[in-house]
Image: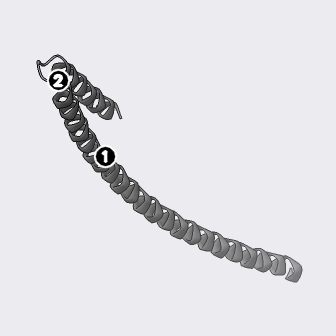
């Protein structure tokens, strides 16, 4: 975000400098106003292009992070299910051994 602020600051400085240069130029008022309008339109178009590019970059990074997050979620869910199944197997094995010991005690 810091680079974006620098870019906007530089563009703003260039726009102000160009505007002041046109205002102090020795031309008629209507020509000067026309130049100001043309320059402001040029800068507005340039700024729009840069913002569109920035938005595209942010959007692509968001999509990438979203895909990675979904992948990590699926992987975590799978690992959790594996651990759950292993835990259930251990519980079943423990119950079976408990019942064996219980039966051995009863029979003796």
Query: Which residue carries the number 2 mark?
Result: 22
- For disc 1, the neighbor class at 10 Å (few under 14, some 14 to 19, many from 20) is few
| Residue 42 drawn at (x, y percent) | 21, 40
Counting residues from the start of the chain, the first of labels 1 and 2 encountered is: 2
Q: Residue at x 25, y 40 (%)?
A: 41
Above or below: residue 94 compared with residue 61 = below
Secondary-structure class at tag 1: helix
Q: Residue at x 70, y 77 (%)?
A: 92
The picture quadrant where one finds residue 11 is top left
The picture quadrant where one finds residue 86 is bottom right
- For disc 2, the neighbor class at 10 Å (few under 14, some 14 to 19, many from 20) is some
| Residue 82 drawn at (x, y percent) | 55, 71
47 or 93: nearer the eye? 47
1 or 87: nearer the eye? 1
Q: Residue at x 61, y 74 (%)?
A: 85
For the N terminus, give its image quadrant: top left
| Residue 67 drawn at (x, y percent) | 41, 63
Q: Residue at x 22, y 24 (%)?
A: 19
Query: Which residue carries the number 1 mark?
Result: 54
| Image disc number at residue 43 | none
| Residue 58 drawn at (x, y percent) | 36, 49
Secondary-structure class at tag 2: helix
């Amino acid at each position: 975000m810091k680079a974006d602020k620098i870019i906007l600051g530089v563009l703003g400085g260039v726009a102000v400098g160009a505007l002041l240069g046109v205002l102090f130029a020795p031309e008629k008022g209507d020509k000067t106003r026309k130049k100001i309008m043309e320059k402001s339109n040029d800068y507005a178009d340039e700024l729009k292009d840069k913002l569109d590019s920035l938005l595209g970059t942010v959007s692509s990074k968001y999509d990438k992070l979203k895909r990675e997050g979904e992948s990590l979620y699926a992987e975590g869910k799978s690992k959790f299910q594996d651990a759950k199944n292993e835990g259930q197997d251990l519980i079943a094995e423990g119950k079976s051994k408990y019942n064996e010991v219980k039966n051995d005690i009863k029979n003796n």
